């Protein structure tokens, strides 16, 4: 086994620097790589935004073939890494949330360093970050002192070439399972959409809905805005200054907890509030939690709260919808449809890779309302029909997780010398 030499990153990279702040324009301009582009599987240029071409003289963070890009802000994304595989066909730079690592002296093989850093996200986050929990940033000085166990260039090249081949095979399998998962998710949403806009009787007489999101509904159904059926409650804001006032820590739901049709209770955080605020933000059993913002796939996602944690609050990016004239289960069924998703997207504000919808627009969401017995029958039908798809989705998701674990284990074994790679 060839001896590996521990060395600090700053001694093998002559350029470690965050990107520039863009002046964004719509569609026509200079491409800007942001955190949404940076993934270990690929540098996803479909997520780029565009910078004003009249404002380029100050830009210094242009990317080139062989650059390592590492996300530099935010819990969960900080430390995620990608590599520029080929020279960009048009000048492209990174924004201030991404760090470029480069060496003009050839002291490391770029693909090796990329693979090495791709398995170090948790460690980089733990020892190279600074700031508050949800506002952490990559410290350039700490990252420069991050130690790499570096073999000679020839071995780096051999390991990188081996990993390129082997991870490509695993990535192909992952992509196939992800496509399957997308198809199953689409089929589930289509099934829900048909049931909540047409019902279960194929011979029912239809009427024009007069809504842009669904053309026809059964003639005996109604369409009522959410505000007339529920009370929409906003959540508590994190990170406030309470001075010397006494506070308490209470469990609360974040955007990540609210999944499509269910609540993820595996990671419940706590929020600091004044004791007298608990009653104002306390959830009640039967409240429908709906995401106010987040990634496009999280927007408007909702689930019914079963009251199993008491008290429990919700953050300001999660609405609590308290139903008065409709069943919570019907509301969560409706918001899982194509038409609700289309409504959320059409009424949301877009910012970088995030979207958000206002309380006013949530209240205007059109809710299709069949008679009570019909609602009950549709809910029961969809429980059975979607459970089959959910089981298939669960198997696909588990397979994807196992493949990712296999990929990480393979990279770890290769870059740490646990397996021998022929040069």
Image (tube, helix red, strand yellow):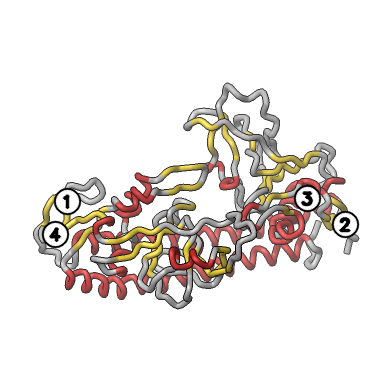
Cα separation, mark 1 vs mark 4, equals 9 Å
Residue 209, numbered label = 1
The correct choice, above or below, for 67 with respect to 121 in the image is above
Task: Pick whichever of labels 3 and 2 is earlier in the sequence.
Answer: 2
Q: Residue furthest toward the bottom?
A: 308
Query: Which quarter shows the N terminus?
Result: bottom right
Task: Pick whichever of labels 1 and 3 is earlier in the sequence.
Answer: 3
Q: Are marks 4 and 2 in contact (CB under 8 Å)?
A: no
Residue 218, numbered label = 4
Categorize mark 4 by other alpha carbons within 10 Å: few (<14), some (14-19), many (20+).
Answer: some
Report the residue marked by disc 3. Answer: 143
Asked if residue 116 shows in the view, the reply is yes
Cα separation, mark 2 vs mark 1, equals 68 Å
Residue drawn 57% across and 24% down?
Answer: 53
Categorize mark 3 by other alpha carbons within 10 Å: few (<14), some (14-19), many (20+).
Answer: some
Cα separation, mark 1 vs mark 3, equals 58 Å
Classify residue 115 as left or right of residue 29.
right
Residue drawn 60% across and 32% down?
Answer: 89
Residue drawn 50% across and 30% down?
Answer: 25
Q: Residue 38: percent from the left, percent from the top?
A: 61, 48
Cα separation, mark 4 vs mark 2, equals 70 Å
Nearest to the observer: residue 79 or residue 3: 79
| SS category of the residue bearing label 1 | loop
Q: Are marks 1 and 3 in contact (CB under 8 Å)?
A: no
Cα separation, mark 4 vs mark 3, equals 61 Å
Classify residue 420 as left or right of residue 241.
right
Task: Pick whichever of labels 4 and 2 is earlier in the sequence.
Answer: 2
Cα separation, mark 3 vs mark 2, equals 15 Å
Report the residue marked by disc 2. Answer: 6
Q: Residue 377: percent from the left, percent from the top?
A: 21, 73
């Amino acid at each position: 086994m060839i001896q590996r030499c521990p060395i600090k990153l700053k001694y093998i990279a002559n350029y470690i620097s965050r990107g520039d702040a863009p002046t964004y324009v719509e569609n026509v301009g200079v491409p800007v790589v942001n955190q949404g582009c940076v993934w270990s599987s690929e540098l996803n240029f479909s997520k780029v935004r565009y910078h004003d071409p009249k404002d380029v003289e100050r830009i210094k963070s242009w990317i080139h073939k062989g650059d390592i890009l590492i996300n530099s802000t935010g819990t969960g994304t900080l430390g995620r890494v990608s590599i520029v595989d080929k020279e960009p066909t048009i000048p492209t730079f990174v924004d201030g949330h991404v760090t470029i690592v480069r060496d003009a002296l050839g002291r490391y093989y770029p693909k090796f360093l990329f693979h090495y850093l791709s398995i170090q996200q948790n460690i980089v986050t733990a020892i190279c970050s600074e700031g508050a929990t949800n506002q952490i940033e990559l410290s350039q000085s700490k990252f420069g002192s991050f130690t790499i166990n570096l073999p000679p260039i020839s071995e780096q090249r051999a390991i990188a070439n081996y990993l390129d081949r082997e991870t490509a095979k695993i990535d192909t399998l992952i992509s196939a399972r992800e496509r399957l998962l997308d198809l199953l998710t689409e089929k589930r949403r289509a099934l829900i959409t048909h049931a909540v806009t047409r019902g279960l009787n194929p011979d029912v007489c239809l009427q024009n809905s007069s809504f842009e999101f669904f053309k026809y509904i059964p003639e005996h159904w109604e369409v009522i805005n959410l505000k007339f059926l529920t009370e929409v409650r906003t959540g508590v804001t994190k990170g406030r200054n309470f001075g010397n006032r006494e506070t308490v820590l209470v469990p609360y739901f974040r955007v990540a907890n609210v999944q499509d049709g269910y609540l993820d209770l595996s990671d419940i955080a706590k929020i600091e509030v004044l004791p007298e605020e608990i009653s104002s933000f306390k959830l009640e059993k039967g409240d429908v939690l709906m995401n106010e913002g987040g990634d496009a796939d999280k927007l408007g996602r909702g689930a019914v709260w079963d009251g199993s944690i008491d008290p429990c609050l919700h953050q300001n990016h999660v609405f609590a919808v308290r139903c008065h004239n409709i069943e919570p289960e019907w509301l969560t069924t409706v918001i899982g449809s194509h038409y609700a998703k289309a409504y959320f997207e059409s009424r949301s504000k877009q910012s970088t890779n995030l979207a958000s919808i206002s309380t006013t627009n949530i209240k205007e969401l059109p809710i299709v309302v069949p008679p009570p017995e019909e609602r009950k029958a549709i809910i029961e039908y969809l429980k059975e029909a979607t459970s089959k798809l959910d089981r298939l989705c669960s198997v696909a998701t588990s397979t994807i997780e196992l493949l990712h674990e296999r990929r990480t284990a393979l990279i770890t074994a290769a870059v740490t010398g646990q397996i021998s790679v022929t040069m």
